[in-house]
Image: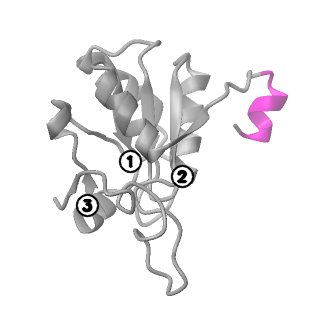
Amino acid sequence: MTENNEQAGVAHSKVDDVDVKEAWERLKGDPGSVLIDVRTQAEWTFVGVPDLSSLGKQLLLLEWQTFPEGQVSPTFTSQLESELAAYGAGKDTELFFICRSGQRSLHSGEAMAAVGYRACHNVAGGFEGPPDSETHRGLVAGWKAAGLPWVQQ
């Protein structure tokens, strides 16, 4: 939530951090829950995406920021609301947001909480987690490092 939003009186909705393995278990246990990957098209293509096929679910893909500009998509919340409605997801649906390491997913979860979604969760560690001592990602923490299912697109 930005300082301007707080000054404007917008309530800061809490978005909790959920470990990748806990997120997987909760996605598995709740048929209506949704995983939303907010990375860029380039990341989905070249790094891979979580694979929810064994859960009978589809991953929802929607860029939080544009590439290469890095600007937050001005239509993110409206687009996601439309996609969630098409999935049959409502304001109380468990929504899990994931990005590379956990920052964009936190901000996107906060944006959706600000428009009334009450069960937004940030997947801490993200898809790749932080870099290791040799600056490689995907080995220290995150979805890939936890050995959770993923695919290359």
Q: Earlier in the sequence, mark 2 or mark 1?
A: 1
The correct choice, above or below, for 40 with respect to 1 in the image is below
Residue under the point 57% across and 32% down: 111
Residue found 61% across the figure and 31% down from its top: 15
Tell me which numbered mark, 3 or 2, is placed earlier along the sequence.
3
Disc 2 designates what residue?
102
Q: From this view, report whether residue 133 is shown above or below residue 81.
A: below
Q: Magenta part of the protein: which range?
A: 2-9
Q: Quadrant of the N terminus?
A: top right
Q: Secondary structure at mark 3?
A: loop
Residue 14 percent coordinates (x, y): 67, 28
Amino acid type, residue under disc 3 in the picture: Gly
Q: How far apart are the two marked residues, 3 and 2, measured between alpha carbons?
A: 16 Å
Q: Nearer the viewer, mark 3 or mark 1?
A: 3
Q: Is residue 122 magenta?
A: no
Q: Residue at x 16, y 59 (%)?
A: 153
Question: 142 left or right of 2?
Answer: left
Q: Is residue 8 magenta?
A: yes
* Mark linked to residue 63: 1
On screen, residue 127 versus residue 152, left or right, reads: right
Q: Position of residue 150 (x, y in %)?
A: 24, 54
Disc 2 element: loop
Query: How far apart are the two marked residues, 2 and 1, measured between alpha carbons?
Result: 14 Å
Say above or below: 39 vs 35: below
Residue 19 in the image, given as x and y percentages of width and height: 51, 44
The residue type indicated by label 1 comes to Glu
Which amino acid, mark 2?
Gly
> In this figure, which residue is indicated by the disc labeled 3?
48
In the image, residue 8 lies at what x, y percent?
A: 80, 25
Foreground: 60 or 140?
140
Residue at 57%, 43% in the rendered image:
106
